[in-house]
Amino acid sequence: MTRIAIFASGSGSNTENIIRYFSDNKDVKVVLVLSNQSRSGVLIRAQLHNIPTFIFTKDDLNECSKVHDMLKDYNASMIVLAGFLLKIPLYMIEAYPNSILNIHPALLPKYGGKGMYGMNVHTAVVENKDEKTGITIHYVNENYDEGAIIFQATCDIDEHDLPEDVKTKVQALELCHFPSVIESIIP
């Protein structure tokens, strides 16, 4: 069985979507939701689905033992980043080779890297008058947004779209594709 741990920092819409998607799957289970934000909406969403949660600090993540021990306690075999903003440390990448996925709200390699998340990305897309944007689901490596790309989906940008409009279009792509792409790479 594939046991997924989800790392998230925000409201948790992608996390809840993933939990629902796999809720009746006998071979895949979301076993833990972790967040570095104690007031994050993702924690409430996870608890509503009876998924255990764990709150940690940036130091906890980087120091290796607390977060890694929690993942081992839940026997996590895959990590999914769903709106998680901290850089994943090398020890975790080495412990979970080709088993950490991230979703990015742009068509990488455009608009990737440190500081390029959420509305920062959508604003850049509008300011640069891009005609298309989308999502990228990729493996995580030691650099922000540089891991091997697994999947991309696009949406058109209207010349009158505001960053908020782009956000809505991109979130629709995330909710549509993220769970099935996760499922597609599970051995």
Image (tube, rainbow, N blue to C red):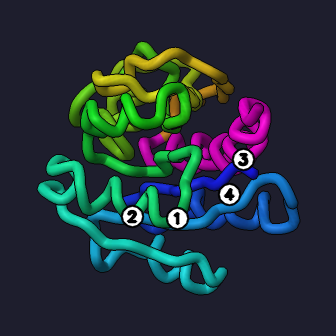
Determine the residue positioned at 53% across, 56% down.
5
Residue 39 drawn at (x, y percent)? 31, 79
Q: Identify the residue under disc 1.
A: 74
Q: Are marks 2 and 1 in contact (CB under 8 Å)?
A: yes
Which tag, 1 or 4, sits closer to the chain's start?
4
Residue 70 drawn at (x, y percent)? 39, 64
Disc 4 residue crowd, few under 14, some 14–19, many 20+, Cα 10 Å: many
Which tag, 1 or 3, sits closer to the chain's start?
1
Identify the amino acid type marked 3: Pro
- Work out how far the residue at label 3 is from the one at label 2, CA to CA, in angstroms: 23 Å
- Work out how far the residue at label 1 is from the one at label 4, CA to CA, in angstroms: 18 Å
Mark 1 or 3: the one toward you: 1
Magenta span of residues: 162-187
Which tag, 2 or 4, sits closer to the chain's start?
4
Q: Identify the residue under disc 3.
A: 179
- Work out how far the residue at label 2 is from the one at label 1, CA to CA, in angstroms: 6 Å
Q: Identify the residue under disc 4.
A: 18
- Looking at the rendered structure, the secondary structure element under dot 3 is helix
Which tag, 3 or 2, sits closer to the chain's start?
2
Q: Which mark is residue 70?
A: 2
- Looking at the rendered structure, the secondary structure element under dot 1 is loop
